[in-house]
Each structure stands twice: as C-alpha cells, then as structure tokens.
Image: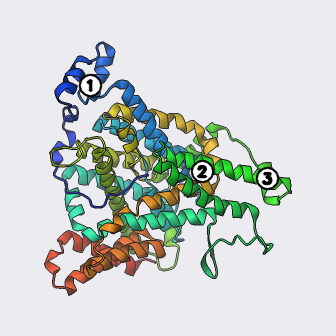
Amino acid sequence: MEEVTNEVQPEISEAAATLAPPADDAPEVSGSDAAAAEAAVPTGKISKLDKFFGITKSGSKIKTEIIAGVTTFMAMVYALLVVPGMYNKGDVPFGAVYIATALGAVLGTTLMALLARMPLAQASGLGATAYITGTLLGSGIGLTYANAMIFVLLDGIIFVLLTATGLRKKILAAIPNEVKIAIPVGIGFFIAFIGFKNAGTVVISDGGIGFASFNVLSGKLDYLGAISAALLLVGVIAIAVLSHKKVTGAILWGILGTAAAYFILAGLGCAWSDAGCMKLFNDFSISNPFSAFADWGQHSVGQVFANGFDFSAYLAQDGNSGGTLVVLILTSALSLCMIDMFDTLGTLYGACSKGNLIDEDGNPIRLNQCMLSDAIATSAGAVFGATTVTTYVEASSGVAAGGRTGLAALVSALCFLAATFLSPIAQIIPSCATAAALVWVGVLMMSSVKDIEWSAPASALPAFLTIAVMAFGFSISFGIGIGLISCVVVKICTGKIKQISITTWIIAALFVALFLLTN
C-alpha cells in the first residue's frame, strides 16, 4: 500500500529537469564492483536493453531486474482486489472497476519504467479511493461515479501543471507541517474504518456505531456475518505476522488465506444446512473473464466525458447550486491533489532510500520524472475509469530484491496486464478478506503520529482536528480543511500571522467556502 512518510522533505529539483535524460542519473557502483560491472556489459540485442535502462551501469543484472519486478507485483497486486471492493455499493460493476484499476496500474507502471526509468510501480491509491467512495460518493450528495472521474481528471491535470512549472514546491510549503504529518494518520483511520464496516466487525445502527456481537447464546447470531467479522481480525493478525517475517506479498497471502478460511467455514455451515451458507454456494459461479472487459467498456472507459459533466442529480438536491458545485469541484480536486502529492512524495522517499536511489541532497533521483509519470497516469487513468494512480510503497520490496532500473517496473507492468484476465477470481474474494488489507493499511499509516508535537498546543490542535474530523466526520477533505483553518486561526491568535503565506490563505478560504456553501 502506498504510505506517506513522516515529513515531506524539501524538493530542490527544478522544472527544467523534468525532461532531462534519466539514464545518466542511474546510481553508479565504484571500486571492484564497478570493474566487475564493466566486464559484465552484455553484447548483441540485449545490450540495447541494457543501455536504455542503464542496467549494468547501476550494478544490476537483467535476471535480478525481472525477479524484482515480479516481487513488486506480488507485493501490491492486492490493490486489484481491494480498490474494486471499495466501490461495492456504487453504480458501477466490480468487473468494470477491476479492469480500470488494472489498466491504470499498467499505464502508470509503464510510464515509471520508460519515462522515469525507476524500479517502482503504480496503481490506484487506497487513500484517494477512500476519499472518492466515502466522501464524494458515499455522502449522499448526488454525485455519480462518472462525476468522480472529473475530480480525478482535474487532479491529474493540476498535478501535471504543478510538476511542469515547479509550483508543486509552493503548494507543499503552504501546507503547515503539523497538517502534513496528520493527513496520513487521518486517512489511515478512515481506511481502517471502511475495512471494519465492510467486514461487519463494526456495525452501524440507529443506536450508533458498535462492535459486532459474537454472543452465541442470543439465538440471533448470523453465522456468515459472524465468521466474516471474526476473520477480519484473524486476517489482520496473519498479515502482521507475515510482514514481521518479511514474507514477500504478505498482504496478498493474508487476503487469500482469509478467503480460503471463509469458504472452508462456510462449507462447514452447510453441514447443518445454514441458510446463508447454502445460498452462498448455490449462487456461486465463475464468470467469463471477458465479461469484465464488456462491463468496463459500458460503465467505465470514457464515462468522464460521456456522463461526467452531468451534475443534475447533485443540483436537484436542496441547498445545492451552481455556486456550491464550483466550490465542491475546486476543493475536491485540491484534496485529491494533496492526497496524491503526499502519497507519491512520501512513497518515493521511502522506497528509493532502500536502494540507494537518492542523490547527494537526499532526494530520489529523477524525482520530477517520477512525479510526472504519476500525474500523466492519473489524468489518463480517469479516462479509463481508474481512481487516482500513485506510487505504492510496496515497490520497495522489489528494490530490496535488487531492482535498480525501469526494467523491473516494465516487468511489473506486464504482470498487471496479465492480471486483467483474472477478474473472475477477484470477484469471489469475500469482503472480510479485502477488509483485512484495508485495516492493515491503516496500521501502516499510523507511523507518522509520533512526529506530531503533542506538547505544543499550537501544533497539536490542528493535527488532532485533521485526524479526528477525517475519522469521526468520515470525510478526508473536511479533515484537511478543518486542520488548515484551525492552523490559520491559531497562528493569528498567537501573533504569528506573518507566517501564513498567501497560498495558505487561499487554500483555507476555499475550504471555508466549502463548509459554508455546501452540505
């Protein structure tokens, strides 16, 4: 899963470096290793591949790059199961989102291979997907899946412009540090809550939110519901243990193991003719893999243009107008862009540091090309029907396996392409299995909470409000907005108004308008 680091480090790459030839920046080896690498230069047709990616120059080998690419794919293929599942109650079929997500991963990872020439992989981000499914589509304000793709497209276009012009640095500088640190923590809680809810471990009722009942003496226990709620906890523990043992693809194996346990226990339920278990197996079927492509063609690809600009359902609701729609579009696109930006930067620093893929200033090499790959993939992914495409921190597993060049990413992209035909298998994975992955992602995103200055009230309050509003208000954008606004107010009241930049004022004003003019 993509992960945001504790603090987004300062960027010093200039916009002019965006199109600089990347092969010259490949990490070099020295001494006896350099001599060995020089002697190992391949000849013939393979030499062209080696020269393009700078494999020998980086001290790697083609075999090593292939293994690294497969390792990365295994570590993050769970995204193809989880992302479509987060749309499970939307107006688009599972298969359509599955194909869109897979093709978005193919495109983004291919760009990372050929444009940035880095051993990293991309796919639809869980944070951005949670924002779209939970805040935009799940809040009942009348937005559709096609409408959501408009926000994703704007996010990508903004990201391209910010990257190409170098304005990205100003946006990052405008976000107070305490809010930057709190954003991934809040998103972690948000994603984990979705997982608990999808598995039935947390139950929402008229009485509020509560933990699922496992009282077998009540006579009201639903067997399938009970094993789903329990297996979520088992699955998360399994993923944690596998991760501790550094098992490649721990999340994927956790999902598959939980799914297997679910069907085994459901099979036992058939022994005493449990109605739910009987129905589960009676309705069981494996669809034609090409039907997912048909669903994708009908419900996802091109919907951003075909129906994305139709906001009639939103405008039909009381209190909504053209003015509120403009504010909603601006703030939502901005929120997605910030989520994408922090996810990508944090992941790049985290993954690249594991493979010495950083420059003398501590920044990932070819940073602008990596960011541009992300931005282009997000823009094109919106046309496919894919949520914001971002770099996954799981790519660090491929880097740890020896991946140093874009060839590893190209191998990962080919694996994602092959996975487009596995949608029938993905559709039978129970929600408790994918929910376990969501909760584990929440665990991973908690790490930066320790860097919040809890002893400094002026920093602690905005950070806490950012996290609390995301988690309890079930809105990522509202959490970011409240965090920014509270930070501005605190600085005004503490005599630090000069520390507030013009960009910060503008962003805070947009969020104030969002709260005042929209539902």
The residue under the point 33% across, 61% down is 338
The residue under the point 32% across, 80% down is 461
- When the figure is inspected, residue 135 is found, relative to residue 258, above or below; the finding is below
Give the CA distance from mark 3 to mark 2: 28 Å
Question: What amino acid type should be assigned to the residue bearing mark 3?
Answer: Leu
Query: Neighbour class for label 1 at 10 Å: few (<14), some, many (≥20)?
Result: many
In the rendered image, residue 446, in percent from the top left (x then y), is placed at 40, 64
In the rendered image, residue 178, in percent from the top left (x then y), is placed at 28, 71
- When the figure is inspected, residue 5 is found, relative to residue 462, above or below; the finding is above
Q: Secondary structure at mark 3?
A: helix
Q: Secondary structure at mark 2?
A: helix
Residue beneath label 3, please?
A: 268
Question: What amino acid type should be assigned to the residue bearing mark 2?
Answer: Phe
Question: What amino acid type should be assigned to the residue bearing mark 1?
Answer: Thr
Query: Neighbour class for label 3 at 10 Å: few (<14), some, many (≥20)?
Result: few
Which of disc 2 and disc 1 is earlier in sequence?
Answer: 1
Give the CA distance from mark 1 to mark 2: 42 Å
Does 446 sit left or right of 134 as displayed? left
In the rendered image, residue 381, in percent from the top left (x then y), is placed at 42, 47
Which of disc 1 and disc 3 is earlier in sequence?
Answer: 1
Residue beneath label 2, please?
A: 94
Q: How many marks?
A: 3
Which of disc 2 and disc 3 is earlier in sequence?
Answer: 2
Residue beneath label 1, please?
A: 56
In the rendered image, residue 341, in percent from the top left (x then y), is placed at 31, 56
> Which one is closest to the eye, mark 3 or mark 1?
3
Q: Quadrant of residue 509?
A: bottom left
Give the CA distance from mark 3 to mark 1: 55 Å
**Of all residues shown, which one is farthest toward the top?**
44
Q: Quadrant of residue 327?
A: bottom left
